[in-house]
Image (cartoon, helix red, strand yellow):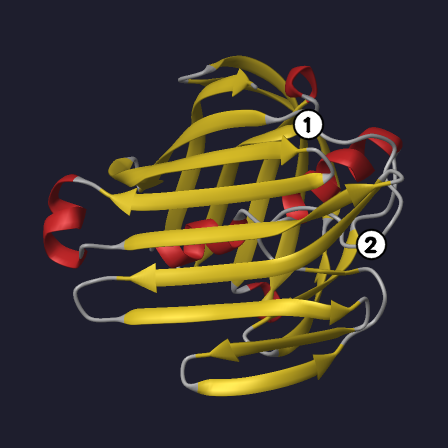
Amino acid sequence: MIKIMQSMLILILISATASAAPQAFQARYAVLKSGLSLGEMQASLNYTGEQYTYTKQTKASGLAALLSGDTLTESSRGTYKNQQFSSQHYLHHHKSHRKDRRDQFSFTAPTQVKGQYKDSIYTLNVPVDTLDPALLELRIMGDIAEGKALHYRITEKGRLKDYHFRKLGRETLNLPAGRYECEKIQMVRDNGERTTTIWLAEALNYLPVQIRHSDDGDIIETQLMSHQPR
């Protein structure tokens, strides 16, 4: 379940123009299934000079932790220069009682990644402006603010994927972190069997404050519990 939730929390532009660097922040999210708590996710974006680090860590809690022991860590490191993000290194590490799995890669050029998934080494040629999956949400944040189309190329597990979001209008949410006016977007996959819906709060520079993933009748959500600029 954690893998599903954090793979939805996707984030940032790789070597494409942005209007300004997103502000550094730290945020905390609750992870829920059918209203019951599964765990929490911590997310943070930091800058050191022209280097950025974006990290998300999700941990199961309560009975979910006892049964699965799930933890998931994602990180993306790279540069921010001339109003452009360039991802250099990506890590996705999913660990539980039953598995210890990694997908990690580096952009050796704007159109090439080299990495390892499970026990396989791979090299993949990708189009310019391909994103690593830890960073898509910040890209969406900027594109929503500028009224752009929400179409992206993502690379993960040695494969290239297309993500297309449609805009569903505005909605007000009452969440543990507060009340927010949001832009609502949705991605539909597998002939409608899986949907991902994201609410982005205008007051927080379009930070995702709620994400809902529906997969064959199961509904899993993340909801913002706290947010702090850094």
Q: Is residue 109 left or right of residue 10?
A: right
Amino acid type of the residue that numbered disc 2 sits on in the rendered structure: Ser
Residue 51 found in image quarter: top right
Number of labelled discs?
Answer: 2
Q: CA gap, disc 1 to disc 2?
A: 21 Å
Residue 97 found in image quarter: bottom left
Residue occupying image coordinates x 58% and y 16%: 180
Which one is nearer the viewer's eye here, 42 or 66? 42
Q: Position of residue 77 (x, y in %)?
A: 61, 50
Residue occupying image coordinates x 83% and y 30%: 20
| The N terminus - image quarter | bottom left
Amino acid type of the residue that numbered disc 1 sits on in the rendered structure: Tyr
Neighbor class of circle 1 (other Cα within 10 Å; few <14, some 14-19, many 20+) is many
Say if 49 sits above or below 87 in the image.
Answer: above
Q: Position of residue 160 (x, y in %)?
A: 68, 74
Please name the residue that numbered disc 2 is placed on. 15
Please name the residue that numbered disc 1 is placed on. 206
Which one is nearer the viewer's eye here, 79 or 5? 79
